[in-house]
Image (cartoon, rainbow, N blue to C red):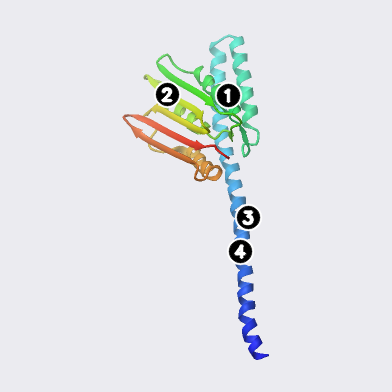
Amino acid sequence: MMQQFIIVYPATFVYALLISRIRQRTIRAEMEKALAEARVKAMQAQIHPHFLFNTLNSIYSTSLQEDARKTSHLIEMFSDLLRYSIDDNDKKRDIIQEFDFITNYVNLHRTRLLADHILEYDVSLDANNCKIYAMLLLPFIENAFKYGLATNKPSKVRIDLRVKSMQLLLHIENDIQAATGKGSGIGLKNTRARLNLFYPGKFALKNEWHNNKYIVSLEIDLVND
């Protein structure tokens, strides 16, 4: 019996230790998942208000300068944006819907461009049954308008957005204004975190300052996502 006890006791101890470690890993995985979900909710809460208030300001300015017909059209566009933005952005949307959303957002910004502002917007979609997480690209485009357009000198923003062979490519260039500094902003930091969460190992993001321009290049592999 003593020999059996000596043999069984270590085995029982090892088994109990193994079960304990498995439980710890399970609990840790559940906590990390919950934390990731909480982070996404927090990110959305931080990104959306800035976007909404900027758009409201654009519509208000236009209503003071233009006739009611154009203003009503802008309000209709904004309503579509608002409806799209308040849906559950943790889920994937059809890429066509996302492209339409971004195009409406860019067109709203066109209404507040000054005469010496230049906006180049090129979009191309060559994909079927392609989906992407909603509003994932918006912070990059939002920052280009926020930091790239000056009120006292000519400014230029260039946006290229395309999907080909299930590869999404986003390239943005904007002039660097004095107030921009070197910070990427909380929106961009949160977006990088969302990319890491939703597309781990499937994206490449590069941002740099070059010749008084801020350049963002993003590639996302949408295959089997």
Using the rendered view, name the quadrant where residue 4 is placed.
bottom right
Which residue, given by chain and number where applicable, does mark 3 sit on?
Answer: 30
In percent of width and height, residue 74 lies at 59, 17
Label 2 CA crowd tier, 10 Å (few <14, some 14–19, many 20+): many
In percent of width and height, residue 161 lies at 48, 27
Which residue occupies the extreme front position in the image? 165
Q: Nearer the viewer, residue 149 or 196?
A: 196
- Gap in Å between the C-alphas at discs 3 and 4? 10 Å
Residue 24: mark: 4
* In the image, residue 135 above or below residue 21: above
- Gap in Å between the C-alphas at discs 2 and 4? 50 Å
Q: Element type at marker 4?
A: helix
Residue 100: mark: 1
| Residue 179 appears in view | no
Give the amino acid type for the residue marked by disc 3 in the picture. Glu
Mark positioned earlier in the residue sequence (1 or 3): 3
Contact between labelled residues 3 and 2, with CB atoms less than 8 Å apart: no
